[in-house]
Image (cartoon, helix red, strand yellow):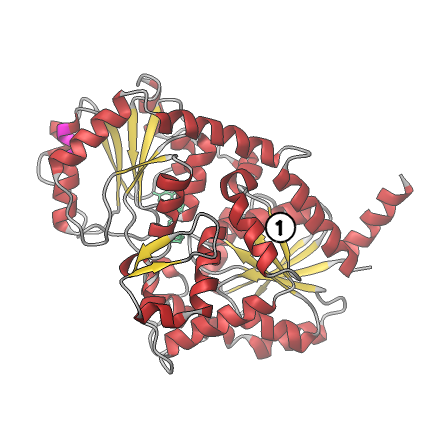
Amino acid sequence: TATEDATAAAATTTHILVFPYPAQGHMPALLDLTHQLALRGLKITILITPKNLPALTTLLSTHSTSIDTLVLPFPPHPKLPPGVENIKDIGNSGNAPVTASLSKLEGEVIQWFQAHPSPPQAILSDFFLGCTQQWATHLNIPRIAFFSVAALLTSILTHLWQHLDKLHSSDIIEFPGLPLSPSFPQHHLPSIFRNFRDGDPDWEIVKEGMLANSKSWGYVYNSFYALEGEYLDNIQKELGHHRVYNVGPLSLIGLSKSSDTKYEVLNWLDTCPDGSVLYVCFGSQKLLTEPQIRALALGLERSKTRFIWVVKSVSSQQVPDGFDERVSDRGMVLRGWAPQVEILHHKAVGGFVSHCGWNSLLESVTAGVMLLAWPMEADQFINAKLLVEYTGLAVKLCQGEHTVPDSDALARIIYESLGQDIPQKARAKAMSNKALEAVKAGGSSAAALDELVKELTQLGV
Ligand code: UDX
């Protein structure tokens, strides 16, 4: 129709600068979204540093001509070893320094913008990159913050941010103003908030980010209404003037890129009965301590359950001698990087022991696999509350970064969860159907994505 032609023509003139945060827990989802925006006719430039360029090439499922890159050198930082450009090389302690470094790209970005024949009409950046709000203000364009985390987490952090004095008043921190009135022991809240100290450069970066996000033109969440409706509504209500778009699970929208590689582990899964295998993986960064590895190995061995255990290929992550042989009839230790999404979607997989990183959580929910929660740090205790208490999608396995679980207790929980028809399994299946509905035409996430594209398109008119 004429209207559609006009929208399409306008869309081709809308140009967005996308700035992903260089961490496995952040980048893929924003690139999935970028892909969707490009497919809908928006012109994109992705700002990236040289060492993150290969990841970008792998993750972007399209080589559309409407996606360009702006490659700028990573600015050095005294707390970062030379050559480190991604959180995978330094761990979560690198978050504030990496954010501080990337904020120094401002001058070069502004120069590039001013020299560009058709410069961007908006910046879409990770919520960690609060610096981009200031860039956007200088350039007189809007900034959209992309949240690769839960709306529950943002609600909690926003409340904490407004009532920092709470952190000194009690061991249990309550959030009575939020839906379901969550409460947490202090040590389950992100450590940067717990240990905040004005003047500490890392805390100052977090403060700058919180402030910047509160001024952003819009929020995009990799979440969906059936999972976090109350909290998405709460964010919309509290930040009335902001636009909130819940477009997740983005991994589901991007599933078309699933690879053709037939991994050995998938062949092995083909030989296992439906729902019989436990998948064990603690995200992209977390290393277990030696006593934790021993306890988990013993727990898996005693559980008499089939399993895949992903162990990072660094020397500190050795499983006990002879473990592989002892469990070879029913278990597989995968060293290095696992094809997690493909594994979770295999019908032989019946449970997932996870640290409750947001991406792992969404991937499990999407695949309809119940979780066995072992939150350790950062946002993971908050995510675990959503899973175990609010949605009933997970069984509580263990908790704590340094906790060494009792092997017999692990074995029992694993055996009973995988072997029995517990309600978490049915709920996980039901939630996966809701995730599918959300991204289908007319679903809540599909509608939010359409709305986002429409509003971005209007910026170019
Ligand atoms: C970090 C934080 O620790 C977490 O709390 C936050 O919610 C997101 O950022 P990370 O350890 O990267 O999390 O975990 P997660 O969010 O679960 O993301 C890991 C990603 O890596 C998932 O998409 C997962 O599929 C992928 N992965 C991990 C693999 O594909 N293979 C692996 O072997 C390990």
Q: Nearer the viewer, residue 145 or 286?
A: 145
Going by the image, does 89 lie left or right of 232? left
Residue at (56% x, 67% y) in the render: 214
Count of labels shown? 1
Residue at the extreme front: 176
In the rendered image, which quarter is residue 406 located in?
top left
Residue 190, compared with residue 350, is above or below; it is below
Residue at the image position 84 percent from the left and 43 percent from the top? 4
Q: Residue at x 34, y 47 (%)?
A: 283
Answer with left or right where residue 92 lies relative to residue 22: left
Query: Image quadrant for the N terminus?
Result: top right
For disc 1, the neighbor class at 10 Å (few under 14, some 14 to 19, many from 20) is many
What is the quadrant of residue 274 in the picture? top left
Residue with the mark numbered 1:
245
- Residue 437, position as x, y percentages in the image: 59, 31
Q: Is residue 223 visible?
A: no
The image shows residue 164, relative to residue 345, as above or below, that is: below
Where is residue 50? Give x, y as percent: 48, 64
Side of 457 relative to 398 (left or right): right
Q: Quadrant of the C terminus?
A: bottom right
- Pinpoint residue 346: horizontal percent, then vertical percent: 40, 26
Instruction: Say if the magenta span includes residue 329.
Output: no
- Tell me: 273 left or right of 449: left
Q: Is residue 322 visible?
A: yes
Q: Which residues are magenta?
A: 298-302
Q: Where 26 sits versus 336, above or below?
A: below
Name the residue type under label 1: Tyr
Q: Secondary structure at mark 1?
A: strand
Residue 112, picture quadrant? bottom right
Taking the spot 38% from the left edge, 61% from the top edge, the residue there is 87
Q: Is mark 1 within 8 Å of ligand 1?
A: no
